[in-house]
Amino acid sequence: MEEDKKQNHNERMQRKKEVVDAAIDRAQEERGIVILITGNGKGKSTSAFGTLYRALGHGQRTGVVQFIKGTQATGEVIFLQQHPASAAVRYHAMATGFTWNTQNWDADKRAADEAWAQAAGMLADPALSLVVLDELTYMLKYNYLDTAMVIEAIRARPPMQTVIVTGRAAKPELVELADTVSEIADRKHAFKAGVKAQAGIDF
Ligand code: ATP
Ligand code: MG
């Protein structure tokens, strides 16, 4: 690169650094937050589990409730169950309940209520730094759980606890409550081109 271009680049980076440093100085509050990962693209649950492993790496205690039972246990859950760090994880998966395969309101509702009771216990436990409520959005969308009740329990959690909610079609109340909202767009998905779901990638 020519000398004047290098000089320009360095000056530009210096200005960028000043802006970033000022933003870092401004952010001084320490508290738990609500993270919502929504949208139709792939990467919501894996992102939530990535953050869970991040917290475990720092020796924190965590909780997970999975509100939809897949036909296959996901790799991240199998890994956790085999790992010594699982001692630091409270875990509940919805027993039967809502999948695209069952159309049984009473059974689904019972399972949703049970899963919610577990979630509510975690949201009241100050020992948990992070609580993941995976696919919770569907419980609200299909009215298995009362939105106001869920919002209130998340709001009333211990001040240092962070909550991650995943799932498509998040209600506006959840978006409003969340401090960080990431919407993953579905630009492409291999499944739509005929690629079969794969262990280690899709579950
Ligand atoms: P992941 O668990 O891989 O992070 P996700 O949580 O964003 O995905 P879900 O809606 O919970 O997405 O669906 C999980 C499963 O559906 C995964 O096997 C994933 O590969 C697949 N999937 C996710 N998004 C899409 C999509 N846009 N089209 C087709 N399949 C998808
Ligand atoms: Mg998911």
Image (cartoon, rainbow, N blue to C red):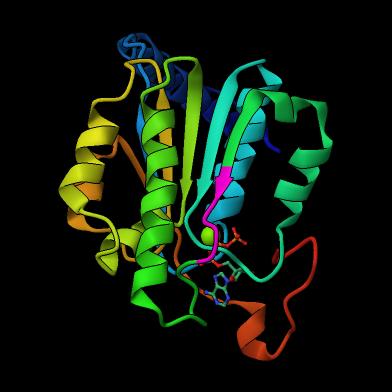
Image-quadrant location for residue 28 = top left
Determine the residue positioned at 70% across, 22% down.
57
Determine the residue positioned at 49% across, 40% down.
132
Determine the residue positioned at 56% across, 64% down.
42
Quadrant observed for ligand 1 in the rendered image: bottom right
Give coordinates of residue 145: x percent, y percent: 27, 56
Give coordinates of residue 94: x percent, y percent: 52, 56
> In the visual, does 172 lie left or right of 169?
left
Q: Is the magenta stretch mostly helix, strand or loop?
A: loop
Against 192, residue 150 (above or below) is above
- Residue 97 visible in image: yes
> In the visual, does 69 lie left or right of 76?
left
Give coordinates of residue 155: x percent, y percent: 23, 30
Q: Which residue lies furthest to the bottom in this view?
A: 194
> In the visual, does 135 lie left or right of 55?
left
Q: What stretch is highlighted in magenta?
A: 92-96
- Residue 183 visible in image: no
Against 45, residue 29 (above or below) is above
Q: In which quarter of the image is the N terminus?
A: top right
Give coordinates of residue 152: x percent, y percent: 19, 36
Against 198, residue 115 (above or below) is above
Specify whether residue 95 is painted magenta. yes
Q: Out of 39 and 26, give the one closest to the viewer.
A: 39
